[in-house]
Image (tube, rainbow, N blue to C red):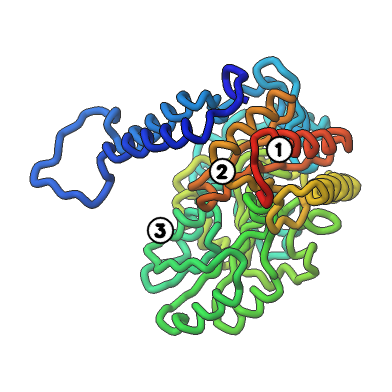
Amino acid sequence: MTASGSDPLSQQELDSLLSSMQMGLSKVPAKTGATRSKPRQATGFETHPLYLNMKVQRDFAQLLQINDPYYRRHEVQAGANSVIDGRPVSNFASYDYLGLNGHPEIVAAVGEAVGTYGTSVSASRISAGERQVHRDLEAALSRNYGTDDCIAFVSGHAAAVSTLATLMGPKDLIVHDAVIHNCVVVGAQLSGSARRLFPHNDLDALEALLSDERDQFERVMIVTEGLFSMDGDGPDLARLIDIKQRYSAVLMVDDAHGLGVLGKTGKGIFEHQGVNPADVDLWLGTLSKTLVSCGGYVAGNAVVVDLLKHQAPGFVYSVGMPAGAAVASTKALEIMAREPDRVARLHERSQQFYHRAKAKGLNVADAWGYGIIPVVIGDTIKTLHLAERLLQRGINAFPILPPGVPEKSARLRFFLNQSHTPEQIDEAVDATVLEIASLGVTRPF
């Protein structure tokens, strides 16, 4: 719904506004390319190209009467339900897949840890020393993946960036899925390695690339995700392992969204596909999703973990994880293992959404129907209007727009939670169908 409650603008009005936006963008100084003998001096950032682009986009949204979907104020804990600006909503924009955020056991364990260790460990673990809670978390994660050891970073993004930048170098090659998370892209860039992309989940293309280029590099690392956060699908892990073995490569799997979601007991993509986790060299993940905390981790063999604990900048030069954050994730892992019914309910709710959406003609792309289900609209403006209209109905689903996804594939992304009720799911799907029709989105979406 527009800010004034009116219908979206006509196509003629949209074309006019798009033309205005393009004219505005053409006036933005290019970040690279044009050369000047004497650059213009600046003391502030009001003329920064990125800021000017943001301003043009915001002005365009205001002309379209679209409310800004970013940084909405939530007034309660993240979960299946929320309150936004004083209004209760069914929340499909939370990573709390197993409904563990605020679990009484976790809250109590965090309180005890804070009482014992305080709210900060004050410095990096290498200098300020270890706390048993850190070792307990790393041991629990290592057991989940069947690895020698694990390292827990204070930031999930930094875990990937520092790991890639530390392990790989100028003589090496990093090959990753074209829609991999930003943390892998940044880490690969900082490593100084050559970088190649293969089309999403296209392992034929990956193998062709390695066949052509493997012998030009010292080390090669293949990076993919266990459950892709924008698409809700994943790779053929067994075939990836076969490829990495035949081409003497290292395989890293970012299973941040797979943990707690995939597999009968939520252990991740390896359990979902019946693969030995030891055949994957590095397991990357975050603590902010199923494990309802903050931070990241890398699980692997003892040599890699030892190397990272002494050389990775995001670990060595960053403060250690607060005790409360570490304990929250350890307890969440314990509850996940003890209560597999949570995973079963998540699967049931996810499949309900998935099958109802498909039956109603919604485009869910190639999603597997576990935890993450996109509804692809294509048109960016209509996607923004759809998100706003659903919010007015009490349904919060976040719009994902280019460049976060490829052009003409804008979508709403629904995160499922084991705590969602069947009624909430039916209502969300049915309301989405109705609002798509009212926006004039034609099938196939």
Question: Disc 1 or 2, which lies upstream in sequence?
Answer: 2
The residues bearing labels 1 and 2 have C-alpha atoms spaced at a distance of 14 Å
Contact, CB < 8 Å: mark 3 with mark 1? no
Front-lying residue, 170 or 67: 67
Asked if 138 appears above or below 395 in the picture, the reply is below
Q: Nearer the viewer, residue 139 or 77?
A: 77
Relative image position of residue 377 (x, y in whole percent): 63, 45
Write down the residue under mark 3: 189
N-terminal label among 3 and 1 = 3
Sequence-first disc among 2 and 3: 3
Image height check: is 144 above or below 199? Answer: above
Residue at the front extreme, as displayed: 12
| Residue type highlighted by circle 2 | Asp
Kindly state the secondary structure of the residue where label 2 is placed.
Answer: loop
Q: Residue furthest top?
A: 86
The spot of residue 275 in percent (x, y) is 76, 71
Numbered label attached to residue 278: none
Specify the label residue 437 is tagged with: 1
